[in-house]
Image (spheres, rainbow, N blue to C red):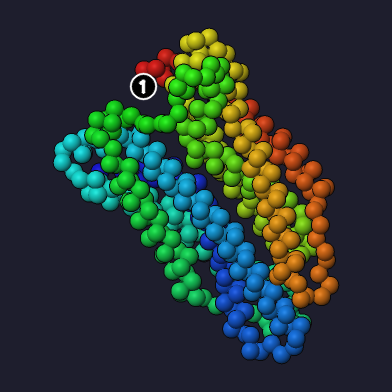
Amino acid sequence: MVIRLKDTAKLFGITIIACCAVFVCTLFLSYNIDLAAIKDEITTEAGMAMYNAQVLMGKVIAAVSGGCLIATSVVMLLFYVKNYIGTHGKELGILKALGYSNIKIARHFWIFGLSVFVGCILGFAIGYLYLPTFYQKQAPDLQTLIPELKVQFHPLLAFALVGAPTIAFAVISVLFAYLKLKSPVLDLLRERQHYKSKIGGDGKEDTPFLKDLRGVTLRSKKSLVFFVAFSAFCFSAMVQMSFSMDEFASETFAVMVLSIGLILAFVTLFLSLSSVVKGNTKTIAMMRVFGYDDTTCSRYILGAYRPISYIGFAIGTLYQYGLLRLMVSVVFEDIENVPEYSFDFKALTVTLILFVFTYELVMYLYSRSIKRLSVKSVMME
């Protein structure tokens, strides 16, 4: 079969996202399970209020953060399966021409689930090793309200966070590959990809070429639009949230939130922009042939994603504000001495400055990679 283990090395972004998702879920779900084990030992009203707040907070964070990361992993997985079929159409088309059925070819795509397995096992192992420290740092004041928690290993939780996602992602890979392989054999052999959008539209509108090219670049690969927006979303939400963590949680938790946010932001941004440049090499080559300089190529190919990133930043800002408001007004509603939360404009300003500087620096580095593209080598592919 044409799928090899080294082909899955490109899926390290999924591995990292899965690792972060399982790490977060391991901490909070383990904490909730161990907390439930000592519920009968809590005798005070204040202790029960804190217990309910901690359980609800764990559920909210695991559901929102873990669910968001899992959904992102699914989108990224589908993108890579589709991209693999698009770039290996000739090999797959030959197999179909030789009589192999779609399902017989598609079943080999289970190997894409290995990236999820590696990420899940790493996230669970790191999370489990960090649990003793997490229990101490999670809420130091709890020791006066509830009995001390002891770390326990939960086999069912391990399967739910490692085994189940691996199986699910392997099945998703096979089913999606099966659907994509239904394309005609000739289309696969020619590595022909169907896009609804085309430069020039239907002829009813006289749209300038460069403006039309910007729109086609965005519409042709909508998954890349999602990844660029998601990278900005992670940067915005996690960095701003880390500024407020010192009031509602420990400093360790703030560092964890910041670290996960930056890792996800940079991984998805680098992967998406690399795919943008690689997927538009022939377009860039043709623009050079027509006399456009490298700055113009970069502005209308890479620059097409700039507004998307700032939209993602804005959504991340609203997300972190809504999540923290939910925590204060619902989760800690019955807890005394919890500080009021209001929108932190200082955190927004600092985060926005950091984001603009970082994003524009990354865009500049990738624009230099466009300058290094050889028209001759691209056209000979």
- 31 to the left or right of 46: left
**From what the image shows, is residue 44 above or below residue 374?**
below
Q: Position of residue 352 (x, y in %)?
A: 74, 41
Q: Position of residue 251 (x, y in %)?
A: 75, 61
Q: Position of residue 364 (x, y in %)?
A: 63, 27
Residue that appears at 75% across and 66% down: 328
**From what the image shows, is residue 344 above or below residue 83?**
below
Give residue 299's quadrant in the image: top right
- 264 to the left or right of 102: right
Give residue 378's quadrant in the image: top left
Residue 250 appears anywhere in the view:
no
Residue 63 appears anywhere in the view:
yes
- 240 to the left or right of 156: right
Residue at the extreme left:
99
Residue that appears at 42% across and 31% down: 196
Give residue 342's quadrant in the image: bottom right
Q: Quadrant of the C terminus?
A: top left
Residue at the extreme top:
291
Residue that appears at 43% across and 57% down: 117
Crowdedness of circle 1 by 10 Å Cα count: few (<14), some, many (20+)? few
Q: Quadrant of the N terminus?
A: top left
Between 311 and 10, the one lying in front of the other is 311
Disc 1 residue type (three-letter): Glu
Residue that appears at 33% across and 51% down: 175
Label 1: which secondary element: loop
Q: Position of residue 13 (x, y in %)?
A: 50, 46
The residue indicated by pointer 1 is 381
